Amino acid sequence: MIPNPIRKVLSTFQNCEVRALLMGGQACVFYGAAEFSRDIDFAILADTGNLKRLQQALEDLQARVIAVPKLAEDYLERGHAVHFRCEQREVAGLRVDVMAKMRGVDSFSALWERRTVLEGRDGEHYDLLSLPDLVAAKKTQRDKDWPMIRRLVEAHYAAHENDPTEKQVQFWFAQGRTPELLVALSIRFPDAQIAAARFRPLLLTVNDTDRLTEALAAEEKAERAADREYWMPLRRELEEIRWSKAQ
């Protein structure tokens, strides 16, 4: 069941025709890997028309910017997140974060084409990042994101393991985070394992769980380092904005 404040934000965005995709912890709930969060995160289309519609939705929610930078197309296009706090009675205290660009994630137009559309019990439709795109967005330096990636992939495997499509098997090989899952997949789908190893060489080590465990840890470490490097200039820019506002 979708909490009322989350449903209110989603319906407000829909009513204002905001082109946005739910991501973050709330999207994880939809995909069966529950994550408690008082935030609601969106990937959005950063163009003039959509930002006007977004601004209207935020006004309806009485949402105010709570940090730098301000809501502006140039900041979003450079990869910044913009953070809001809602004050409208039904959503009071809820934080809404929006981004238009993320490391290792496709353009919004590609994300929109691949989106997942779910229908709630209330008959409304919800646009989410596709599961592969959500996993890609979760590859950050934050400790909490990596267990969530594992849960997302394993929840998907549990839901579809009896009659998987080729695309689903490819996804599991590409994003599986535990030796147990990858070994099980290699036994069931040896040809798919060989094909996937061309893009993820650690799959060649499935017969040696110690090596596989080390390779998975090294893969995660490299992604975390890449994310830190990606955010370094953005954080410097935020500090410059804060400093200029303080003058």
Image (cartoon, rainbow, N blue to C red):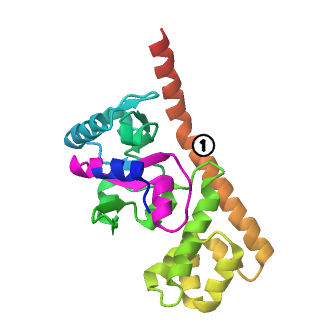
Residue 81 highlighted magenta (yes or no): no
Q: Residues within 10 Å of mark 1 (few under 14, many from 20)?
A: some
Q: Position of residue 9 (x, y in %)?
A: 35, 47
Q: In the image, what residue occupies the spot 25% across and 48% down?
A: 18
Q: Position of residue 55 (x, y in %)?
A: 27, 36
Q: In the structure shown, which secondary structural element does the residue marked by tag 1 occupy?
A: helix
Q: In the image, what residue occupies the spot 55% across and 62% down?
A: 34
Q: Nearer the viewer, residue 114 or 30?
A: 30
Quadrant where the N terminus sits is: bottom left
Q: In the image, what residue occupies the spot 37% across and 28% down?
A: 70
**Residue hosting label 1:** 228
Q: In the image, what residue occupies the spot 51% across and 54% down?
A: 25
Name the residue furthest top: 247
Name the residue furthest front: 89
Whether residue 79 is situated above or below residue 103 in the rendered picture: above
The residue range painted magenta reads 12-41
Q: Is residue 53 visible?
A: yes
Is 170 on the left or on the right of 15, as rendered? right
Q: Nearer the viewer, residue 166 or 34?
A: 34
Q: Tell me the kind of residue under disc 1.
A: Arg
Q: Position of residue 11 (x, y in %)?
A: 29, 52
Tell me the quarter of the picture where residue 180 sits.
Answer: bottom right
